[in-house]
Image (spheres, rainbow, N blue to C red):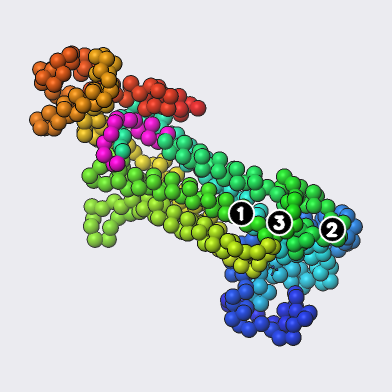
């Protein structure tokens, strides 16, 4: 690190029993300041709440509290403006800030760490950070859901093919398809909210692992820091990282949903499908092929799931088998979470932009919906309804008619009544009413079905 300053002797923060300074490799493997500086504002907020509590219960004087509080505020400003010098020999954000406080206010800085350890300090900082990321993810998902709802609302009547096995299955609508993603992203949002409710407990005051003999007020710090309550067990407080695992789990599931929608956008925007037109804002050109408009944002969003799920596996693997309470292994918790949170935020923003801007190609979707004998199920249902046939028999008759149409190279609706009656004599002219894609879609009135009225109801809900 360029701003690194070598100390003259052993670490000033804990070096009482050390004569030598650490080996350079030790410093390199031990230091987390390169990444945990992202917890600076959480660390300062935690220290402010801790100092206010120490003063309120009489553990430190009001004068010391004032000096600490003023000093922390200045340090926050230095960090925000980029003037703060981060030192690797001071290991992490906690000791960098405390050391700077000592430079500013002298001995009073040493009283801040009373009844506290870096173990509960880092557990607090990280929890605050992850909690904020849950809020961010929930808000970003809200924006994506709004963009999907706008597409759904204008597309309740836009017929498109519904697929299974990526083979045309039955006609659905653009609105219905968009609403499927709305459901997925609403569940994702609720997963972040659930995780946030569970992590809403303040670990500050657990100290190293056993709590403290000082008469601290944990309810006061929990409240000041916006938590519902303090954590109940001091050992668990410093050793738990399942709050971060839950965030990564929710992020991973959400990323798989983003990846599936991305995949559809990539397919839909291809010349072969031509279902949608993407805006220039979320595509790129090719340096050699002038005609190209590539869906790079969708491809990169599809790929982000790799690093997000990778982060979950990383932290799961770090945590498994760790004895209680704190072990330094847990310093490896931050980078995967930071990386996953950044990737998720970017992927959600890119997807929101793409969804807001994409244009369904209505005529092409209608045409594709009619391909692949997509109303065959409607024909089978008609035989069941009008002729009282068992569905299995109706399925067989319809299969024969599909085969006939395929041989003739036409659609089901293009078969003459005579031709149909050669397979099943009781078929009447009325059958043609159910063979259009519009009729098919309109008939799907079951709860949650594809019918425009049902989709409009969903959107309204
Ligand atoms: N930098 C450390 C971490 O991220 C802070 C806690 C250090 N605690 C300790 N007992 N060495 O986990």
Q: Secondary structure at mark 1?
A: helix
* Residue 250, position as x, y percentages in the image: 53, 48
* Residue in the picture at 27% in, 61% down: 287
Query: Tag 2 or tag 1, which sits nearer the N-term?
Result: 2
Circle 1 residue: 242
Asked if labels 3 and 2 touch by Cβ distance under 8 angstroms, the answer is: no
Q: Around disc 2, counting alpha carbons within 10 Å, would you say few (fewer than 14), some (14 to 19), or many (20 or more)?
A: many
The residue lying at 62 percent from left, 79 percent from top is 26
Crowd band around label 3 with a 10 angstrom C-alpha radius: few (<14), some (14–19), many (20+): many
Instruction: Give the CA distance from mark 1 to mark 2.
Output: 29 Å
Residue 176 is covered by the magenta coloring? yes
Q: Dot 2 corresponds to which residue?
A: 54
Q: Residue 264 at what x, y percent from top left?
A: 34, 44
Magenta span of residues = 165-179
Residue 48 visible somewhere in the drawing: no
Looking at the picture, tell me which residue is in the foreground, 397 or 68: 397
Quadrant of ligand 1 in image: bottom right
Residue designated by label 3: 237
**Crowd band around label 1 with a 10 angstrom C-alpha radius: few (<14), some (14–19), many (20+):** some
- Earlier residue among tags 2 and 3: 2
Residue 259 magenta-highlighted: no
């Amino acid at each position: 690190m360029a701003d690194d300053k070598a100390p003259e002797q052993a670490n000033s923060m804990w070096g009482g029993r050390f004569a030598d300074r650490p080996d350079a490799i030790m410093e390199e493997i031990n230091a987390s300041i390169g990444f945990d500086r992202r917890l600076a504002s959480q660390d300062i907020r935690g220290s402010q709440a801790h100092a206010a509590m120490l003063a309120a219960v009489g553990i430190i004087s009001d004068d010391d509290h004032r000096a600490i509080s003023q000093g922390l505020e200045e340090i926050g400003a230095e960090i925000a403006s980029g003037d703060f010098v981060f030192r690797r020999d001071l290991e992490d954000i906690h000791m960098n800030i405390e050391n700077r406080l000592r430079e500013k206010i002298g001995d009073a800085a040493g009283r801040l760490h009373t009844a506290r350890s870096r173990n509960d300090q880092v557990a607090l900082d990280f929890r605050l950070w992850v909690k904020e990321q849950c809020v961010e993810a929930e808000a970003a998902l809200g924006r994506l859901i709004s963009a999907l709802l706008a597409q759904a609302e204008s597309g309740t009547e836009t017929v498109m093919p519904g697929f299974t096995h990526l083979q045309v299955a039955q006609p659905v609508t653009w609105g219905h398809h968009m609403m499927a993603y709305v459901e997925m992203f609403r569940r994702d949002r609720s997963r972040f909210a659930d995780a946030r409710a569970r992590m809403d407990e303040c670990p500050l005051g657990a100290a190293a692992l056993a709590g403290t003999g000082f008469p601290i007020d944990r309810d006061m710090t929990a409240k000041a820091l916006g938590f519902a309550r303090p954590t109940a067990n001091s050992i668990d407080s410093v050793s738990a990282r399942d709050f971060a695992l839950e965030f990564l789990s929710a992020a991973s599931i959400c990323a798989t949903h983003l990846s599936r929608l991305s995949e559809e956008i990539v397919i839909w925007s291809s010349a072969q499908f031509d279902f949608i037109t993407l805006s220039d804002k979320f595509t790129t050109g090719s340096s050699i092929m002038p005609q190209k408009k590539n869906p790079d944002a969708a491809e990169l969003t599809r790929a982000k799931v790799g690093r997000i799920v990778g982060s979950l596996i990383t932290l799961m693997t770090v945590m498994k088998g760790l004895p209680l309470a704190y072990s330094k292994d847990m310093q490896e918790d931050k980078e995967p979470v930071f990386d996953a949170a950044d990737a998720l935020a970017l992927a959600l923003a890119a997807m929101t932009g793409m969804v807001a801007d994409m244009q369904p190609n209505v005529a092409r979707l209608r045409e594709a919906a009619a391909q692949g004998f997509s109303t065959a199920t409607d024909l089978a249902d008609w035989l069941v309804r009008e002729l009282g046939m068992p569905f299995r028999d109706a399925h067989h008759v319809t299969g024969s008619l599909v085969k006939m149409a395929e041989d003739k190279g036409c659609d089901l609706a293009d078969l003459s009544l005579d031709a149909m009656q050669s397979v099943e004599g009781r078929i009447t002219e009325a059958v043609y009413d159910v063979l259009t894609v519009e009729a098919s879609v309109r008939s799907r009135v079951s709860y949650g079905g594809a019918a425009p009225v049902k989709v409009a109801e969903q959107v309204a809900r």
